[in-house]
Image: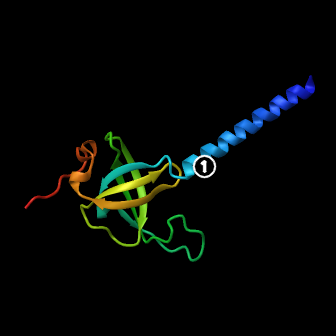
Amino acid sequence: MRTKVAVAVGFSIAAVAVAAVIAGWWVLSGNMNAAYYTQVDNARTEELESRGGVIDPTGGMSLLYRLPAYDEQGNQQEVSFGTERQLREGAYLKLEVEPIRGVVGWEEVSFDELPQEAQAHLDGPVRP
């Protein structure tokens, strides 16, 4: 009887471990990426100092942006990401955001490429 219980407990622990590994792989492989949209505001940057060889979580970037960003439903989240240079003031960005790693990529897009719910929260383009 004890052997059957031990085997059942062992299989349960193994199943939970396999599920945890699969879930971790799923999250870290980018399958849970989300797109967020923001507008560059250079007043919301912070200059970063080099850590002189110590592990640097910002990847050696010299500027840190902290901006409000919006998903396709208009839900807001503050995002932080580093850049090597100052970005174009007022530019619209599509951010690729992963749950644990944060912003892993971005590209400049036009206002018309933004989802309507995100457009509602950002300043429209200045028309001549």
| Left/right of residue 70 with respect to residue 101 in the rendered view | left
Answer with the quarter of the image where residue 83 lies: bottom left
| Left/right of residue 28 with respect to residue 102 in the rendered view | right
Q: Is residue 123 above or below residue 46?
A: above
The tally of labels here is: 1
Q: Residue at x 30, y 63 (%)?
A: 43
The residue that disc 1 covers is 25
**Chosen colour scheme:** rainbow
What residue occupies the far top of the structure in this picture? Answer: 1
Q: Is residue 19 above or below residue 41?
A: above
Q: Residue 64 at what x, y percent from top left?
A: 41, 64
Q: Which quadrant would the N terminus be assigned to in this image?
A: top right
Q: Secondary structure at mark 1?
A: helix
Q: Residue 107 at what x, y percent from top left?
A: 34, 61
Answer with the quarter of the image where residue 110 lies: bottom left
Q: Nearest the camera: 113 or 44?
A: 113
| Residue 34 is at least partly visible in this image | yes
Q: Residue 70 at what x, y percent from top left?
A: 33, 46
What residue occupies the far bottom of the structure in this picture? Answer: 52
Q: Residues within 10 Å of mark 1 (few under 14, many from 20)?
A: few
Q: Which quadrant would the C terminus be assigned to in this image?
A: bottom left
Q: Residue at x 56, y 77 (%)?
A: 52
Q: Is residue 52 above or below residue 42?
A: below
